[in-house]
Image: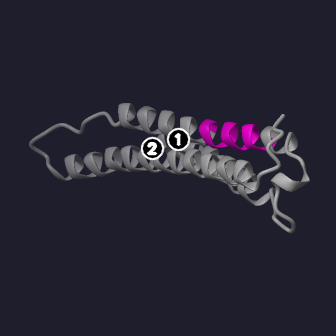
Amino acid sequence: MSYLDDPRVFFAAERTLLAWQRTAIALVGLGFVVERFGLFVRMVNAGNSAHPVADGLPTVWFGLAFLVLGAIVSAMAAHQYQGFVRTLTYPEIPRGHHTWLGPLLNYGLSACALAMAAWFLHSAT
């Protein structure tokens, strides 16, 4: 519990949440790019009859791993932020400031990443 009665404590927690949110977005984006690059390679190889079509399953699994990792990072960041905000007192949270929007976005990102992973897994089989 903080006894600083300073709103900068809350804003520091928000900056930390946003930093983890950027990390989760980067992981989800990397997972998407890796999985789609495997699809691109399979399509290019399918048009080239001189070379056999390469197996694209490793890119699917690496892409899924990054997507799931991004979802976990996003959800954990929101959970930790909510736990920390519950310990703050009134002077530390500015009046009229909504503390639910950041975690809501993180949980939404986590759900979208898991849905994308499920779609990629379904389309790969």
x%, y% of residue 60?
A: 43, 37
Q: Amino acid at mark 2?
A: Gly
The answer, for residue 125, to whether it is visible in the render is no
Disc 2, SS: helix
Q: Earlier in the sequence, mark 2 or mark 1?
A: 2
x%, y% of residue 125?
A: 50, 37
x%, y% of residue 73?
A: 60, 38
Crowd around label 1: few <14 · some 14–19 · many ≥20 (10 Å): many
Please provide the residue range marked out in magenta. 72-82
Q: Looking at this view, is 49 or 37 the one in front?
A: 37
Q: Left of 54 or right of it: where is 117? A: right
Disc 1, SS: helix
Which residue bears the numbered disc 2?
A: 31
- At x 73%, y 37%, the residue is 80
Q: Left of 47 or right of it: where is 88? A: right
Figure check: 33 above or below 96: above
**Measured Cα–Cα span from mark 2 to mark 1:** 5 Å
Quadrant of the image occupied by residue 122: top right
Q: Which mark is residue 78?
A: none
Magenta region includes residue 79: yes
The answer, for residue 24, to whether it is visible in the render is yes
Q: Amino acid at mark 1?
A: Leu
Magenta region includes residue 80: yes
Which residue bears the numbered disc 1?
A: 67
Q: Looking at this view, is 113 or 79 the one in front?
A: 79
